Image (cartoon, rainbow, N blue to C red):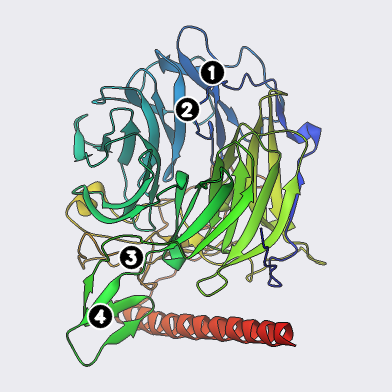
Amino acid sequence: MSQRYSRGTFHHVIGKAAVKGRCYRGLSITRSVQDNQFCAVNPRFIAVVTECTGGGAFIVISVRHTGRVSPLHPRVCGHSARVLDVKWDPFNDLRIASCSEDCTVKVWNIPPNGLKADLTSPSKDLLAHGRRVSLIEWHPTARDLLLSSAYDCKVFVWRLDAPEVPVCVINTHSELVVCLSFNADGSLLATACKDKKIRIIEPRTGRVLQESCCGSRKVSKILFLWDLKMLVSTGNSCWNQRQFALWDLVTHTLMFSVVCVYSADVLYGVCVCPQEDLSEPLLEEDLDGGSGVIFPFYDADTHMLYLAGKGDGNIRYYEVSAVKPYVHFLSEYRSPSPQRGLGVMPKRGLNISVCEVFRFYRLLAVKDLLEPLSFCVPRKQSEGFHADIYPMTAANEPAMTADEWLMGQNKGPLLMSLRPGAEALNTSPTETETPAYQDTEYPPDIIADLQDWTEDDTQSHDWISSRTCCDLNRTEPPEVSLHQRKETQDLLEQLKQRDDKIRELELELKNMRNHMRASF
């Protein structure tokens, strides 16, 4: 593989595994052959799918409960067959969903202080699939929406605040769906299928908007690159080489007006016509001749892509951009211990005092070990807040309700700053409706209300909350507040446009210099 090296802010990012005392030992990790991650993490708890005789179970332990885990530790054991996937609710650290070979999807409420006894009664028991359920995924911006996929080739959208029947059914696949991925606002769903096709689907109606015929390429995993309007897929080439590919999701446009107004990734005054298929990838790179599935992980805040193979001991990471050559190789973490699955800590759970930008939890089945792996930016002085590596990130608050999404609204995620004392920022429109097919991101607009937020026991020295109530007692006249918000919105739009232009010109200049050097 021809690797292009980056010289940006994250060129020197290093991966460092936790010492033995900071790991979680004694976990009976599942031996399932399903190509899932088997681990889910939030700032309070870690969930790991475990081996269980006579049914299916997973264990939930506190993030701070390091060291050896007792074999008698309580488990969530309400499934009658092997558990295949678990996912935490992104807006509720005490709610988790699981799916199983018993053809069910169950939703569980975890006590704030953890499990004191085995949990066997779910809060929701979703029964509609005819065969074992292999995948589940939460909606990224709407509350109480869960998506599931099973071996019956159907994808269901469940509403958890309503009767236990699917509100949307996607029945466009002829073979097993092996991967699902939402875009930033949940208006598009990407699927990878065993028929070697990638589909972009409108999840409310099940209508296929784009489709790629990968030919001899086998696609195993797929992931939206939210901020770049791209899609990354991993799989195998016709020569059985593991590879990843980047796909462009920019749609063709047909102008009907002489004047078009541009505003921070939103295009007005045009008629948007989605392209018929994803004909060819922008970039295709071979990795190696391994046999394990490659899991892609993307950090939109740092534009970093992590590729971790099942059964591998290494993790490659890259920096991705919207202009050629698109991908810059950064480095590779190597370990002699192979990983069976991985969990990822949300950004709000990272330790910003050591400049940590990403954290994996590696399942090492050979050692029955769960090993935290931190990726940090080395700095001479790590004290204080480094705004260049911690931009605004997705908050743990929903941008809209399930009703609003089902009625056709699309809203981007609420944003928050990791800076201590900062407030959450709403990037979503409050009243405007957008077409279901339009993948739109909006500029910052509304300051979110944090008056109902209270501290809990998740506040520790290694988990720094950025949502405090220091400025909530401040009151301003409504007209002044609205005027300030409008000025803030205009300034942020101008800054974003200038930053994008500067970044693009710098990359073009860099590529031109490299080309001139190569020509001499």
Disc number for residue 234: none
Question: Is 370 left, or right, of 449 in this rendering?
Answer: right
* Spatial separation of the CA atoms under disc 3 and disc 2: 32 Å
**Residue depicted at x 60% and y 22%:** 29
Question: Element type at marker 3?
Answer: loop
Q: Which mark is residue 116?
A: 1
- Disc 2 residue type (three-letter): Pro
Tag 2–tag 1 contact (CB < 8 Å): yes
Left or right: 102 with respect to 513? Answer: left
Residues tagged 3 and 1 counted as in contact (Cβ below 8 A): no
Disc 4, SS: strand
Tell me the mark number nearer the camera, choosing from 4 and 1.
4
Where does label 3 land, which residue? 428
Query: How far across and how far down the image is residue 448, in percent?
Result: 39, 62
- Above or below, 142 relative to 270: above
- Quadrant placement of the C terminus: bottom right
Above or below residue 156? Residue 330 is below
Residue receiving disc 4: 268
Of the residues under marks 4 and 3, which one precedes in the sequence?
4
Name the element at disc 1.
loop
Measuring from the top left, give residue 431's x and y in whole percent.
Answer: 21, 66
Choose the circle earlier in sequence order: 4 or 1.
1
Residue 404 shown left or right of residue 293 in the figure: left
